[in-house]
Amino acid sequence: MNHHSDPNQIDPTKTSKTLAIATFGNGCFWCTEAVFQSLEGVHKVVSGYSGGHVENPTYEEVCGKMTGHAEVIQITYDPAVINYEDLLEVFWYSHDPTTLNRQGNDVGPQYRSAIFYHDEEQRTIAEASLRRTDASDAWSDPIVTEITAFDRFYPAESYHQDYYNRVGARNPYCTFNITPKLMKVRRKFGTKLKREV
């Protein structure tokens, strides 16, 4: 991806009439934002918070584990190019859905694995995808991902947005955690990736 262009910039020539939204919690949003930005058909990825009970939470409050929110990404995508099942396949592959309230060294309910469905169709697809993935040999432990109706999404502070593309090379956390995750996803989902510009 060209790091000088905005990965969330929508190209009107590549947009169908109807875009859709998916909201996933799969660990630190710095990591997951970068993964989904690289997919063809994804127009925008916003890091934020969902699933809690406090209005307009701050990053510090969410990290304090008192708001009930998960770190999430909200994905605007073109279903004519990439469908919800495809996004879920990347979701399952790009984090560990078998660890409760934890992704690697990131521990706490804000890092829980969660799918916030926006309509009944998404709920049905997500539940079937979870059953299929759980029955496969993808993970040796049972999946603990919660599937919950979407309620509210609060965008995270501006310094969290597009984090890997802006800061990645200068932050050891990114080098250690995000770069290997991106390489893994690119190897498996090469045909679904945006072409380099």
Image (cartoon, rainbow, N blue to C red):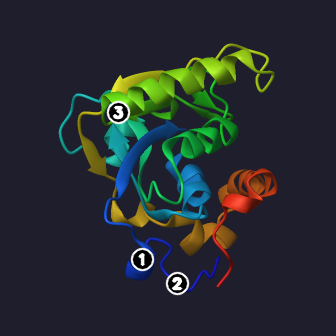
* Quarter where residue 51 is shown: top left
* Quarter where residue 124 is shown: top left
> Which kind of residue does numbered mark 3 sit on?
His
Residue in the picture at 68% in, 55% down: 178
- Viewer-nearest residue: 34 or 191: 191
Residue where numbered disc 2 is placed: 5
Residue where numbered disc 3 is placed: 69
- Viewer-nearest residue: 149 or 80: 80
For discs 1 and 2, the disc positioned in front in the rendered view: 1
- x%, y% of residue 1? 65, 76
Q: Residue 9 got which mark?
A: 1
* Quarter where residue 158 is shown: bottom left
Mark toward the start of the polypeptide (2 vs 3): 2
Taking the view exactly as shown, the residue that stands out farthest to the left is 55
Secondary structure found at label 3? loop
Residue in the picture at 56% in, 39% down: 88
Q: Residues within 10 Å of mark 3 (few under 14, many from 20)?
A: many
Residue 190 sits above or below residue 87 on the image: below
- Viewer-nearest residue: 52 or 135: 135
Residue 180 sits above or below residue 120 on the image: below
Side of 169 relative to 66 (left or right): right
- x%, y% of residue 6? 48, 79
> Which kind of residue does numbered mark 1 sit on?
Gln
- x%, y% of residue 33? 53, 56
| Residue 175 shows in this picture | no
